Amino acid sequence: MLELHAIYKHFDTVKAVNNVSLSLAEGEVISLLGPSGCGKSTLLRLIAGLETPTKGQLHLEGQDITTVSPQNRGFGMVFQDYALFPHLNVAKNIGYGLVEKAWSKAEQKQRVSELLELVNLNGYETRRIHQLSGGEQQRVALARALAPKPKLLLLDEPLSNLDMALRDSLLTDVKAILNHLNMTAVYVTHDQQEAFKLGGRIAVMRSGEIEQLTAAKTLYAQPKNYWLADFFGHANLYLTTDTLTTVAKSSANFFLLRSDLCSLHQSQATAQDFKVKILSQELIADSHYLELFVEALNITVMWQGYERELLSLNPNENQDIYLNIPHKAWIGLKE
Ligand code: ADP
Ligand code: MG
């Protein structure tokens, strides 16, 4: 539905967006995830038409829209700071785009009431913006963006100004609303949890480029390179050695060990069971964090598990403990 072909946006020497290509299917929701300054907002603004690419083309349903104005693209936008009109009440804010598009009064009224229902703000029509909580203001902003039935919805860190609990519940609602409308959307966030919870594909950006674009599950389990593995918080990353090459049966430059696939045992049953020394042990809430030294591989592994997985072991007594490392726990990484 939307296609970006080798898009660049340079501000003097800053390569804010550098050779980005992607395509979005009808009804698909995609997250743009990455650290602050990696070019997420610039990419979103390029899609919206608020920036013109230095190089590259954008196509919407097969038409070249690279030079089409934001108004004529007709996309909806939701920003971090809500950007509502303070002098207009809730209904007038939501209906703003309909007045612009010269919908009849009756159609406007009907559409505004549909949207109030959709974002769960029934009865708020005449409220002033300053009488709303942050979460309610963002619901109004979402309703305003959706009112003119945009082909595409663009959201730039819409939940960043809200506190944790509210963020979570609003995210659930946003997801349900997008799904209900079969809305095609691009959702910018620096928050991994948010991108994962939203579901759909995630494009991870770094220094103006997309490092990897795939389903959330694949991103976490099969990051393409060291930077991505580190970005997703994987603690067990190793520079290759002859031993690791042999054990992992791969000649990658780096290895990621997925300790979530490894288990602890009292005895050595297979060649994949490695004797470990517990270097430290910490209990945080219901999770045990063990730092394990695997002698045969000369690596330290951070392992996390629950009480039930430690019950049969007596790690405090002088008993041998083995870490089972299945072959699929080794992920070879480039760079
Ligand atoms: P993000 O949204 O991921 O935090 P941005 O897209 O806002 O990142 O910014 C990417 C880079 O481009 C940053 O280095 C930023 O300073 C730069 N940048 C963004 N907009 C402009 C602009 N209008 N003029 C100059 N530099 C800009
Ligand atoms: Mg930004």
Image: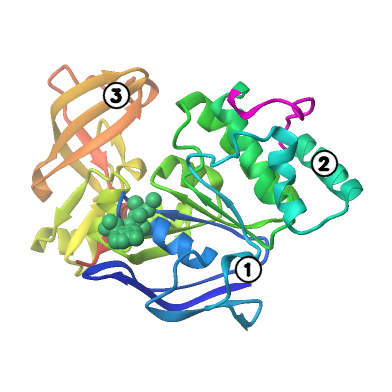
Q: Is residue 191 left or right of residue 88?
A: left
The secondary element bearing badge 1 is classed as helix
Figure quadrant of the C terminus? bottom left
Regarding residue 237, the answer to whether it shows in the image is: yes
Q: Is residue 223 left or right of residue 244?
A: right
**Residue sitting at x 63%, y 34%:** 87
**Residue sitting at x 66%, y 64%:** 74
Residue at which label 2 appears = 114
The secondary element bearing badge 2 is classed as helix
Q: Please identify, in this view, whether the residue under mark 3 or under mark 1 is nearer the observer.
A: 1
* Other-residue count near label 1 (Cα within 10 Å), few / some / many at <14 / 14–19 / ≥20: some
Regarding residue 34, the answer to whether it shows in the image is: no
Residue at which label 1 appears = 73
Residue at which label 3 appears = 288
Label whose residue precedes the other's in the sequence (2 or 3): 2
Q: Position of residue 171 (x, y in %)?
A: 57, 37
